[in-house]
Amino acid sequence: MKYKIEREEYHAVRDAVISLSTKVNSRVIAGENFDWKYRQSPLGDMAMWVDRHAETGRVIGSYGAYPRKFLFQGEVIVVYQRADSIVDQEYQGQGIFRALVAQMTRDLKNEGVHFHFGYSNDLSSRVHQKFTEAREMFESLVYVLPNGTATLSARVLSPRFRRVVTPFLPIISAVFKSRNHIKRLFQKASYQLVAAGDFTDIVVDWSRSNAKSYVYFPVRDYDFLRWKVFNTPADVMKNVRAWWLEKGNQKIGYVVTYEVPETGQVKIIDFLCNDLERTVVESIASIRNYFVEQGVDFISSNVAGRIHQDAFRKSRFMQSGKARCYLYILNETAVDPTSVTDGNFWYQMPIDRDNFSY
């Protein structure tokens, strides 16, 4: 089967890509959600690599990547984050996904981009591992803090085990709540969470402060946070909330959360503080205590970066899983291949993922 892969503008392939995504994923994603993710980034439209059938011109595969700002050696650079690889079921297994990755890599390398990256499942990981430019990143780890039983019984336990455990759920719930209450008593956590209706440019200063501890650090600025937090599609926005972390009248940091509608689980999707050495552990502990006091059943987050992972562990979150990420080194002069798997290479949270929701 002959096909042709080219880089195309999103507006030219929008409807075809949405149609293909609906067909492949067996679910409808609203055009509003596509446009938010593909067109409304403050850095511009998603770059699209599209595979067309050579005879009919029909779109049978696509892969996107949107520009992201990172701090590197004190300067802001633009890299690309891969998103939404889609191949029509009729043509899967014919090397189309690999060809899309290869063309993206060639084009971005020619532009002088430092790297492109994206999160992967087991199937796509097998393809990424075949590229000499690709490196599996330092693990992005999932952390959880149970504070009740509803989420555990509905989402974690198998049906058979759930029937056995259900009679004991009140006891288990009491143990979790007592354990979390003791944590509150013995760990310093004096910052207050104050609802944030918007962000200010102070987050840029915090990005630069945090960046000193990592080789690459994702820029958090007003435009990025407006896009990812306050300008989300309606079905996402209703479950997203943001807070400042404050002590007295001083802002220490911020946190953004997403409440899973089906379970009431709260996900910490973004967090930044003013001083990693002095305030990161107390900030995470203060966030934990706030939601424990609110009676939230289950708190979770996903974070890459050794310093921030240590802060979650010190705040008594439990590790429960990981997410795989592959980074393609396109400029070996700038990117040391041996540093990619180091825990101080970069920092990532769920807000950095390429999802249509959180």
Image: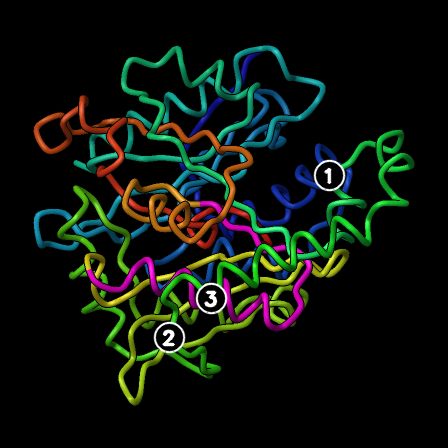
Within-10-Å neighbours for mark 3: few <14, some 14–19, many 20+: few
Residue at x 54%, y 38% (from the top left corner): 84
Residue 304 in picture, x, y percent from top left: 37, 41
Image: 12 above or below 251: above
Disc number for residue 185: 3
Mark-to-mark CA distance, 3 and 1: 28 Å
Image: 341 above or below 308: above
Residue at x 90%, y 45% (from the top left corner): 167
Residue at x 67%, y 37% (from the top left corner): 20
Image: 25 above or below 284: above
- Judge left or right: residue 141 versus residue 177: left
Q: Which amino acid does label 2 sit on?
A: Ser
First to last magenta residue range: 278-302
Mark-to-mark CA distance, 3 and 2: 11 Å
Image quarter for residue 49? top left
| Magenta stretch prevailing secondary structure | helix
Q: Mark 2 points at which residue?
A: 190
Could you tell me which quadrant the N terminus lies in?
top right
Label whose residue precedes the other's in the sequence (3 or 1)? 1
Q: What residue type is labelled 3?
A: Leu
Q: Name the residue under label 1.
A: 156
At numbered mark 1, what does the secondary structure look like: helix, strand or loop?
Answer: helix
Could you tell me which quadrant the C terminus lies in?
bottom right
